Amino acid sequence: MLTDTLFFGIAALILGFVIGSFLNVVIYRLPIMMERNWQTEARMALQLPAENSARFNLCIPPSACPHCQQKIRWWQNVPLLSYLLLRGRCAACAVPISPRYFCVELLTGLAFAAVVWRYDVTLVAAGGVVLTAALITLTFIDADTQLLPDQITLPLLWLGLLFNWYSGFVSLSAAVWGATLGYMSLWSLFWLFKLLTGKDGMGYGDFKLLAALGAWMGASALPLIVFMAAIVGIIASLILKVARSQPMAFGPALAIAGWIVWMANSQINQLIRWWLRLSGFGA
């Protein structure tokens, strides 16, 4: 049993490295694709002639160095190894490559291995891998652009409902309530803060992300996710020395908190039952 767990853990680690390489593509290209789409819609609304721009999506054009535009060959795109062998520099122009690419690949591999180690080779682990990949992607996109794309958050929400309908990780009713309350709770906080200060405290993408997390983990997980996200956000602002007047993405904190709650599901359920008994609500 231990040998099987170790084997599948290593397999998940390697798979995570490969998927992490693709996530880097999504993290870099999806915001550009969104901006181009907004520009196209704006030109149509203003009745301006369409721009003849080259095709750009997750597959086209092939990966290239952002500085010199030299195409990256397959052997220069091997997860982790290529970055180390090239010493973090472009093979053509020697300009430093952002260490984020290495970090995303490493993080994805380690997170996938942790999910399989925690839940073994099960449907829950498969769902956890999908959730993990989405949360990593959203974390880095939001940190870069302060955007949480609907192209990821909305499918993630529906996948959470489908996952619980089929797997029973939480009941379907708990998942539906989780999605509903996840959205409405932050939506209410947003408008309360706006009425009191006249400022936007967060973006609508945060509502959708918490709704997605609620769809995956149920309504009972939401208070802990929000509490932990607040703690993560405070710690991050102190480490990064973010000024109070400077906007800071909340999505990464929500994603980190959501992943921790997913991984500690059984322990959290025990904590909730203990609290209910202590407060007199449980038998």
Image (spheres, rainbow, N blue to C red):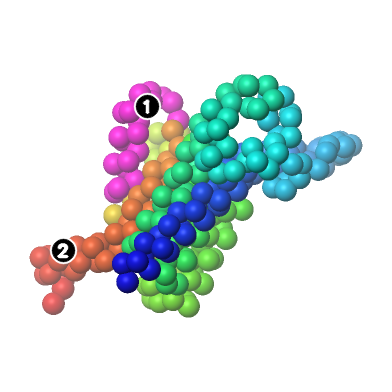
Q: What residue is shown with label 1?
A: 240
Residue found 44% across the figure and 76% down from its top: 167
Give the residue displayed 74% in from the left and 41% down from the top: 62
Q: For marks 2 and 1, give the CA distance.
A: 35 Å
Give the image location of residue 3, x and y in percent: 35, 66
- In the figure, residue 276 lies in which quadrant? bottom left
As helix, strand or loop, the secondary structure at mark 2 comes to helix
Q: Is residue 58 above or below residue 217?
A: above
On the picture, is 68 further left or further right than 130? right
- State left or right for residue 96 relative to residue 136: right
> Residue at the spot x=59%, y=43% of the render?
78
SS under mark 1: helix
Q: Is residue 274 magenta?
A: no
Task: Judge whether residue 243 is colored magenta.
Answer: yes
Sooner in the amino-acid sequence: mark 2 or mark 1: 1
Q: Amino acid at mark 1?
A: Leu
Which of the 4 image quadrants contains residue 147? top right
User: Is residue 14 in sight in this rendering?
Assistant: yes
> Which labelled disc corresponds to residue 275?
2
**Magenta region: which residues?**
227-247
Q: Please, is residue 264 above or below residue 121 in the view?
A: above
Amino acid residing under circle 2: Trp
Q: Residue at x 45, y 72 (%)?
A: 123
Q: Are marks 2 and 1 in contact (CB under 8 Å)?
A: no
Mark 2 closeness class: few <14, some 14–19, many ≥20 residues within 10 Å:
few
